[in-house]
Image (cartoon, grey):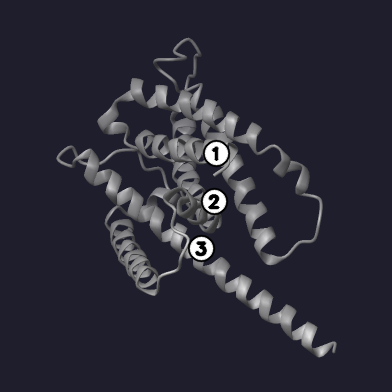
């Protein structure tokens, strides 16, 4: 694996973990939450610097369904992260306590609600690159051959994760968290590891869903291209 790809994967994995920990506000406390936010800001800037060529390609080339979806999701994720970062400064009580805000409730609502949307956009963003991630992991582990049993096992695992993720989404009322103000946190009798597993399962819904929807779209586009090719002869 090329060094640049490895660096990207490490940064993206770290950002994902930091995003999950940042959502565990009630267990980490405000100071750690804000410090994690600063780390996320730094990693987000580095991520965009490494992938700066992507911005130049937005207006170039042909647009198909996959590319339109990719650009839309990436821009929504970018906007959500920008809103999270900008709204976090005025409501900070530890790192930036000197910035006075008379009524910070609206900013807190924007910050929290956008964070949940950012979590969804991040998951879809990962799902759009899931094929690339899997190929990179295969190269790292030296897995070059295909296995029907392994493929079936991975798909069954994906189904189980999605089912558990849907159940968790209902129990945690994710729809309300995305549509109305819902402070970070969970009941204090809940373990951090349990929270992490449940959030990963929710991510699994959007990662798996995005991955297989894109595979379906890609298959349709290949079928259309083949049909046009055969009809022209």
Residue tagged 3: 211
Q: Which of the numbered marks, if any, corresponds to residue 8?
A: 1
| First of labels 2, 3 by sequence position | 2
Q: Quadrant of residue 204?
A: bottom left
Closer-to-camera residue (136/124): 136
Q: CA distance from mark 3 to mark 1?
A: 19 Å
Closer-to-camera residue (123/34): 123
Give the answer, above or below, for where 223 lies relative to 61: below
Closer-to-camera residue (141/72): 141
The answer to whether 5 appears left or right of 49 in the picture is left
| First of labels 1, 2 by sequence position | 1
The answer to whether 216 appears left or right of 207 in the picture is right
Q: Quadrant of residue 63?
A: bottom right
Query: Under tag 2, what secondary structure?
Result: helix
Whether pointer 2 and pointer 3 mark residues with C-beta atoms closer than 8 Å, the reply is no
Give the answer, above or below, for where 166 lies relative to 10: below
Q: Position of residue 172 (x, y in %)?
A: 29, 52
User: Furthest residue to the right?
Assistant: 232
Q: Quadrant of the C terminus?
A: bottom right
Is residue 38 in sight in this rendering? yes
Please give the name of the residue rendered at 44% of the width and 13% of the height, measured from the top-left corner. 97
Question: Mark 3 or mark 1, which is nearer to you?
Answer: 1
Whether pointer 3 and pointer 1 mark residues with C-beta atoms closer than 8 Å, the reply is no
């Amino acid at each position: 694996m090329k060094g640049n790809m490895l660096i990207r994967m490490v940064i993206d994995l770290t950002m994902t973990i930091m995003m999950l920990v940042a959502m565990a506000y009630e267990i980490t406390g405000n100071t750690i939450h804000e410090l994690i936010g600063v780390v996320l800001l730094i990693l987000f800037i580095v991520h965009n610097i490494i992938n700066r060529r992507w911005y130049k390609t937005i207006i170039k080339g042909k647009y198909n369904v996959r590319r339109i979806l990719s650009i839309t999701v990436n821009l929504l994720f970018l906007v959500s992260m920008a809103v999270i970062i900008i709204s976090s400064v005025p409501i900070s009580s530890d790192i930036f306590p000197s910035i006075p805000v008379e009524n910070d409730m609206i900013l807190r609502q924007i910050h929290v609600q956008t964070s949940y949307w950012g979590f969804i956009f991040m998951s879809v963003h990962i799902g759009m690159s899931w094929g690339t991630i899997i190929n990179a992991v295969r190269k790292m582990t030296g897995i070059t051959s295909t296995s029907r049993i392994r493929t079936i096992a991975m798909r069954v695992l994906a189904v189980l994760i999605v089912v558990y993720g849907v159940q968790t989404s209902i129990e945690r009322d994710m729809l309300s968290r995305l549509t109305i103000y819902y402070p970070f946190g969970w009941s204090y009798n809940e373990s951090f590891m349990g929270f992490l597993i449940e959030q990963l399962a929710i991510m699994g819904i959007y990662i798996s869903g995005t991955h297989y929807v894109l595979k379906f779209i890609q298959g349709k586009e290949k079928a259309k291209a083949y049909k046009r090719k055969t009809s022209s002869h």
